[in-house]
Amino acid sequence: MALLQQLTRQVHFKCIRSLSSLRYEDLQITLTSSPSSKPDDSKLKFGAHTADHMLEVDWSAQYGWGVPQIKPVAPLQIHPAAKVLHYAAELFEGMKAYRCVDGKIRMFRPTENMKRMGKTAQRSALPDFDQAEFLKCIKKLISIDHEWVPQSKNCSLYVRPTFIGTEPALGVTASNMAKLFVITGPVGPYFPTGLKPVSLLADPKYVRAWPGGCGGYKMGSNYAPTVAIQSQAVNKYGCQQVLWLYGEDHQMTEVGTMNLFVYWVNEQGEEELITPPLETGLILPGVTRKSLLELSREWNEFKVSEQTMTMKSFIKALNEGRVKEVFGAGTACVVCPVSKILYLDQELLIKTDTENSLTQRFFSEITDIHYYRKPHPWMEAIDEDVEETNLMTECHS
Amino acid sequence: MALLQQLTRQVHFKCIRSLSSLRYEDLQITLTSSPSSKPDDSKLKFGAHTADHMLEVDWSAQYGWGVPQIKPVAPLQIHPAAKVLHYAAELFEGMKAYRCVDGKIRMFRPTENMKRMGKTAQRSALPDFDQAEFLKCIKKLISIDHEWVPQSKNCSLYVRPTFIGTEPALGVTASNMAKLFVITGPVGPYFPTGLKPVSLLADPKYVRAWPGGCGGYKMGSNYAPTVAIQSQAVNKYGCQQVLWLYGEDHQMTEVGTMNLFVYWVNEQGEEELITPPLETGLILPGVTRKSLLELSREWNEFKVSEQTMTMKSFIKALNEGRVKEVFGAGTACVVCPVSKILYLDQELLIKTDTENSLTQRFFSEITDIHYYRKPHPWMEAIDEDVEETNLMTECHS
C-alpha cells in the first residue's frame, strides 16, 4: 500500500511537472497522411511554401506548459477576442537549417535565436519557456520534415518560431494563455545570380524605433508600422528598401529588416567597419550582425566599431571618397550591398563594383560555414535518425 | 439570345460588384441555435463576456470584399503563417451601445470611430472599406443581439470592430488577404461607486509613441509594448496606470490607454483646460477627447487648448497651487480622475475631492447624453425591428 501510494505520487508529480514546464520528452507526434509535393529548388520564393508539419505547444497561467505536439500544418483555432488579434501580443524568430556538403542538416547558431526569443517574451509580457527543450522540439520537427530541406547549396529551410497571446479577453493586460508554434518552409537564394545591390529611401519623416521603445526586441509590433512606408519606398520612389533614420541628427539605424554596416576610412584615416550600437535600444541584436562582428574581430584586419553614424558624417565621408561599402545583414540574405540612398533631395551613390569587396567576403565566409564547406562550431547538427519520441500516454487519461 | 446574354451579363456584373465592395445588402445571417445565458448586470467585467453573434467579412486583393456574415461567435481559422500573427497586421476600434431611458438602443458617435478605422487601415497597409456600409452591418449585429445590451443605466454593450491581415505568407509586405470582424459584449461601469481617482507611474525610461511613428493610429502594435510597463506600474510601484512621457522635456502625452486632460490656472492667470495636440503624432485622436473639447468650447466658460504640457511646467503649477484637476478620458471610463503621479523620486499629489469638479461635470454630461437623458445628435439609434436582410444566394453557386 505504501509502495502504491509512492508510485501514485510519482506519477502525479510527473504529470504536474509535464504540465508546468515545456519538455521535449513529452513531445507527441502525429504524421501527415497526405504529404505535399515539394517545390522545385529553382522555383523557391521566400515565405511561399510551408513544410508538412508544425510544432505547437500551449501555455496557461493556471496549468503552465502543456504537451508539445508535432502535427500536420493546419489553421489555428483562435478566439476572436484573443489578445494576439487586438494588442499584437506576438513575437517571432527567423532561423535557417542547411543541407550541408556532407549531406547532414545543420542549423546556424539556433541558441542565439532562442536566447533572444526568451528576452523578447519577457518584454512582451509573454511567459518564460525552457529554450533548450524548445530547441530540441524544433530540431525534431526539422528532422521529421528533413525531405523539405533543399539539396541545393544556395537554398535552405527557413524556420519560424512564433509566440502569441491567446487569452480570449479584451483589455490591455498580460495574456493568461499563450501558444508557441513553429512552421518551416524551403526558401531559395535571396540573390540567385550573385549579390545584387539595392537602393534605399531615407526619409526622416518615418521612424522605426526610438529610445524607450521596443526596437531591440523581435516583437511583431515593430513590423506593422513599416509596411506602408516600405510600399511607398517601392511604389512612389522606386527604391527597394527603407533606410531607417532616427533623431534630429538623422542617425542611420537599420535597412529594411536588416542591420546596417558601413565600411569606410574614418576621420582618423583608419579602415573601419561600423554598425550602430545596441545600447540605444534602436537596433535589433541580429545573429548575422553578431557573427559578422565576431568574424571581423577574429580577422583583426581593420577597426571594428559599434557606433552611431549620422547622415551628415556619412555624406561628408562619401564626398571625401572615404566610404568603401554599405550593406545590410540578416538571416534572409546574409549580406545585401547598397548602391544608392535617396535622402531628402539627394541621390547618394555608393560604390559596389568590387568583386573583392568585404560584403562579398562576408557572404562567402558565412555561406561556407552554413553549408559546412568550412566546419565551424556555430553549426548545430540535426540527427535525422533519432528514435521516435515516447508518447507519454499515462498523463492523458 | 441577345436577352439571355444581357441577363447573364447583369448577373455577372452583380456578382462582381458584390465581391468587390463591402455592402450591407449582401449581409447573410445565421442565428445561433444555443444562445448563452446573459450575465447579471451587477457582475459585469470589462472584456469578459461575449454576446452570441459576431460579424465577419473577408477581403482579398484578387476578389475584393466578400459577403458580410453575422453568425454565432466561433474561433477564427487562421493559418499559422498569417501576417496578423507575425507582423501585427491588425487594428481595432472601441465603441459602445447604450440602452437609453426611452428603451431604445443608441451608439455614441460611431461614424467618428469608422473614420478613424479607415485612416488606421491606410496607415497599416490594410484595404479600404465602405465605412457607412460596415456601420450598417454593425448596427444589424447589435440589433440581433439586442438582449445583450444591459438594461442598467451604468452598463453598456462594448463593440469591438477588428481588422486583421490574414494572408498566409511570411515576408514583411502588405497582406493580400484580410478579415474585418466585430464582437460585442456587455460591460459594467468603470466606477461602480462614483468616480475613483487613480495613481500614475511617470517613468521617462518608457516611451509609448514618438514623432514619425504610429501613436496617432489605433493599431494593435501600439499596445503590445505597453503591457509589461503597465504590469510594472502595478506590481512594482503600486500605481494603477502609466502616464506616458515623451522627449527630454518629459512631455505628458497619454494616461494608460486614455487621453490626458489638465484643468489649471495658466501662467497668465486664466482658467484653462489643456490636452496634448494631435499634430505631433503622439496622441490617439480619441472620440471622448474630441467630445469633451467640443462640449467645453460650447460652454465657453474657460480657455480650451490643445497644447503640449511638460512635467516641469506641470510641477511648477502644482507647487503654485494652480493645478485644479487632472484626468484621463476614453471610451471605457468616459473620464478618470488622477490623484497622484509618481515621477522620478517625487510623489505629486493632485486635488480630487471636489464634488463640483469639472471631471464630474464631464462625466454627468456625457453619460446623460449616452443614456439619452439629454437627447443629443451624437447618439445614433439602432432599429431593433429591421427586416431580415435578403440572402443573396444567386451569387454563391
Image: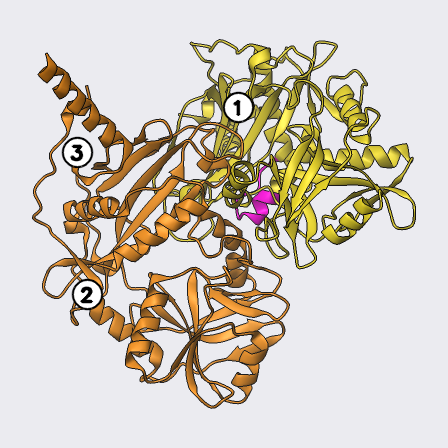
Chain colours: A yellow, B orange
Q: Which residues are magenta?
A: A119-130
The chain carrying label 3 is B
> Which one is nearer the viewer's eye here, A250 or B46?
A250
> Which one is nearer the viewer's eye here, B255 or B301?
B301
Residue drawn at x 63%, y 12% is A384
Residue drawn at x 57%, y 84% is B316
Kindly indicate whether the residues beneath marks 2 and 1 are on one polypeptide chain.
Answer: no
Q: Which residue is mark 2?
A: B377
- Give residue B342's position: percent from left, percent from top: 55, 72
In the picture, which quadrant includes the C terminus of chain B? top left
Mark sitting on residue A27: 1
Residue drawn at x 44%, y 34% is B175
> Which one is nearer the viewer's eye here, A177 or B336?
B336
Quarter of the image for residue A99 reads top right
Kindly indicate whether the residues beneath marks 3 and 2 are on one polypeptide chain.
Answer: yes
Distance CA(mark 3)–CA(mark 2): 33 Å
Residue B315 drawn above or below residue B330 = below
Give the amino acid at mark 3: Thr
The chain carrying label 1 is A
Foreground mark, 2 or 1?
A: 2
Residue A68 drawn above or below residue A251 = above
Give left or right: position of A152 versus B285: right
In the picture, which quadrant includes the N terminus of chain B? top left
Give the amino acid at mark 1: Leu
Distance CA(mark 3)–CA(mark 1): 40 Å
Residue B328 drawn above or below residue A204 = below
